[in-house]
Amino acid sequence: MKRNYCKTKLSTIALILVLTVSAILVALPIATAQEPQSKATFAFINAIPNPVGVNQILLLHVGISDSLGDTEYGWEDLTVSVIDPEGIESTIGPITTDSTGGTGQSFTPDKVGTYKFQTHFPEQVSPVATRGYPAGLVMEASSSEVLEVEVLPEDIPYYPGHSLPSEYWTRPIDAQLREWYKISGNYLDLALNRLAPYNDDAPETAHILWAKQLSEGGLVGGELDTHGFESGDAYQGKFATGERYSIIIGGVLYYNHFEATGGSNVKQEVVAVDLHTGRELWTKSLLDPNGVSQRLSHGQLFFWDSYNYHGTYAYLWTSAGPRGGPFTWHAYDAHTGRWIYSMYNVPGGIRVHGPKGEIYIYNVNTRNGWMTLWNSSRVVTHARELAGLDVGNWEPHGNIYENADELGLEWNITIPEGLQGSARVAFHGDRIIGTNAPGQWDLPKSEIDLWGINLKPNQEGTLLFDKTWTVPVRDLLTIWASASLEEGIFILSGKEIRGLFGFNIDTGEQMWGPTQPQPIMDQYTFGQNSGIMRALSIYEGKIITAGYAGVVHCYDVTTGNLLWTYEAIDHYKEILWSNNWPLIIAIVTDGKIYVTHYEHSPLDPKPRGAPSICLNLDGEVVWKIDGAFRGTEWGGLAVIGDNIIATMDTYDQRIYAIGKGPSATTVEATLMAVPKGTSLTIRGMVTDESPGTKDYALTARFPNGVPAISDEDMSEWMLYVYKQFERPTDLTGVPVTLDAVNPEGKIVHIGTVNSDSYGMFKKMFTPEIEGEYTIIATFEGSKAYYASYAQTAISVGPAPSPDQTIQPEPEAPLITTELAIILAVVAVAVIGIVGYWILKKRK
């Protein structure tokens, strides 16, 4: 049963306040003139660090010992006097403290020697009651003690930081390894332009870390011949959330176990899988307060930063409701899947994430001339404020917020009248871009309105531009494509001419266009709202497109000039209506573009050899694999986090994790002890130790381990290992460096060898001095594997002494050599004859 959090709490609080005020009026004596009208204050100053290096930042802690009773207030107009080592005086300020009575102030000393600092607090009236003192109390002026800070000629050491990992790593990441933020990206929601930042070591080979079955998949066989199990397209998408993307939070992959068909009438489950290891953490139904299972919609990492608490909360969100809203949202703990709180009547609009992970929704009503901003976190804090609870704590647990639309409202403002169409993209705190460009099912327009609304502080709702653009081609269906604030552009696409038009995001003026026509099959991409949004990316000065024509195009963002193309040719004519493989952009990150084949409703048997491709920004192939990671129109597209791509393959309905994995190196010597000057063989193996290689299906096929193979051969090797294709005949292993530490402690380089296709390497070695040797085998890693090494030991003894001279015997031999040979031949013949007669008698 739902309950109205605010109404229930407000009624209770109102009753309590009435009773409390009545009690106070009866119990408290009338205030007398003896209450203090002024109070002495005690100013302070501290400096961190002390001593400090010249030109290093010094943090001054400034204030008085009295706090204020409301977090909205602080003491004002404080100053700090400074005397440098040469006796020159200066002043820092004015300074306003926070409610604790103090605050921080930075200062950079530029002279070596002793600096003197002193805080000065001016007399002022307390704006609020605090610590038993009434509002209006006169806070007397005071000055702190003089603080001396020694400034050294050399820098003092700060925490040195940590390097990025060179070995296989997993979650959790210790919070002290701050530098790792660059490689620990999350995937929370639909990504504009397919961009996935903070994956600065994205996969550079098709190396598979693990595979996990999603549903019944692959070839059915038998009486159904060459047909495969259903793969979820048109319109039963698998491995998808409400945005056709799964979610990655903190190195954990979350996805809906089942397709959306059936909704709440059938059981729904969410699966949580460790992205690094493939280990399933939990599978459960996300139940709302009424016990109904919900489908995963999006994720949130919300940094709560208040005067009481600082930390990030990880939530999984489900969302249900009619198109356009209002919606019902339920929040679940990402670690356990436990229900936390719910919000009803969440408004529709454009959803974006704020700088602290707040979920904002912009709702622009051009017809009636207003715009609202809704904040998910304000729902909780506003409800607590209305209930008289401490707003410094984040405690939504167990609550149901019926009127979330009202509680979360940040502002409601008027906007200029006469704007046509609807908002298409919002950049939080900066601008909204809108248009009346037609949708894929609408009639073409000869003129299209383009407008922008300001979202900057104190300018919200003001008009940036309102332009009418004349479409240069008659009856051209011109639809919204995408936008980039960083690149200063938004784009419309023209279906029939398969071209793009670029517009200045500040003025709405056309910059260029149309681009030269793309191949004819791209009309199906350029003429679909969802199609063009999933087939276009704006990234680092470039516009990248991919579509049904199977050609990746790259344009200059400022001129629209074509820079390069890449064609995904279907060499075996598996696609019946194209010479190329239709492509979709899955992920763009770390200077790489990941594209894969997809199709709206593929025939069965499916076309074989569908490619997945990684290109760099110059259009060069980083890696390509044919016959793996085939995409889907209606199911979930690939996502990335912690530099690991998770994607579904519709050939076998498995989820694959693609990324750099661990390796293992072994080494041994054929002889552990040898005389000096004697050669021996050093041998060993380099194997792939990724989690997927530990599944029984692989340990049964590779009892000695899965060999580590070169980056160049990785795609074919992965098809053999994980998809049971034929074993490639021409494979190269990985380079292994062999060194020895001789008995004198010197390093002797033995050589560098390559392992073979079975993982083994070998090398002859002749130790030169007596004593104990340590043999070291090192695999320095590759784009597919992290490094590994191993050691063994050998002992080298004295060389054998020269043979003694043998003196001849004085007597002549009893028989000659020739005679001995004749006798041996006769003996063999006799034995053969005897054996023949024995066998004959047994018959």
Image (cartoon, grey):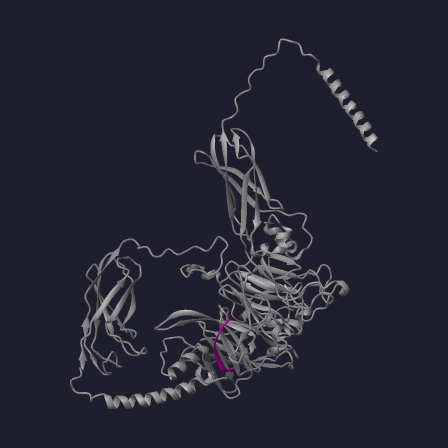
Instruction: Using residue 362 as the reference point, say whether residue 806 is left or right of it.
Output: right
Is residue 444 positioned above or below 214 on the image? Answer: below
Seen at 64% across and 9% down, the residue is: 811
Is residue 146 in view from this perspective? yes
Is residue 499 positioned above or below 796 on the image? Answer: below
Picture mark count = 0
Place of residue 267 in the rendered image (x, y in percent of width and height, measured from the top left) = 60, 75
Q: Overall secondary structure of the magenta stretch? A: strand
Q: Looking at the rendering, which quadrant does residue 122 occupy?
A: bottom left
Q: Judge by depth and name the residue closer to the eye, 127 or 389.
A: 389
Place of residue 478 in the rendered image (x, y in percent of width and height, measured from the top left) = 62, 77
Place of residue 86 in the rendered image (x, y in percent of width and height, measured from the top left) = 20, 59
**In the image, residue 411 lies in the stretch drawn in magenta:** no
Q: Judge by depth and name the residue closer to the eye, 195 or 794.
A: 794
Q: Judge by depth and name the residue closer to the eye, 400 or 161.
A: 400
Instruction: Using residue 414 as the reference point, say whether residue 25 is left or right of it.
Output: left
Q: Looking at the rendering, which quadrant does residue 110 occupy?
A: bottom left
**Magenta residues (range):** 337-347
Is residue 564 positioned above or below 474 on the image? Answer: above
**In the image, residue 342 lies in the stretch drawn in magenta:** yes
Q: Judge by depth and name the residue closer to the eye, 573 or 820.
A: 820
Q: Residue furthest top?
A: 810
Place of residue 457 in the rendered image (x, y in percent of width and height, measured from the top left) = 41, 78
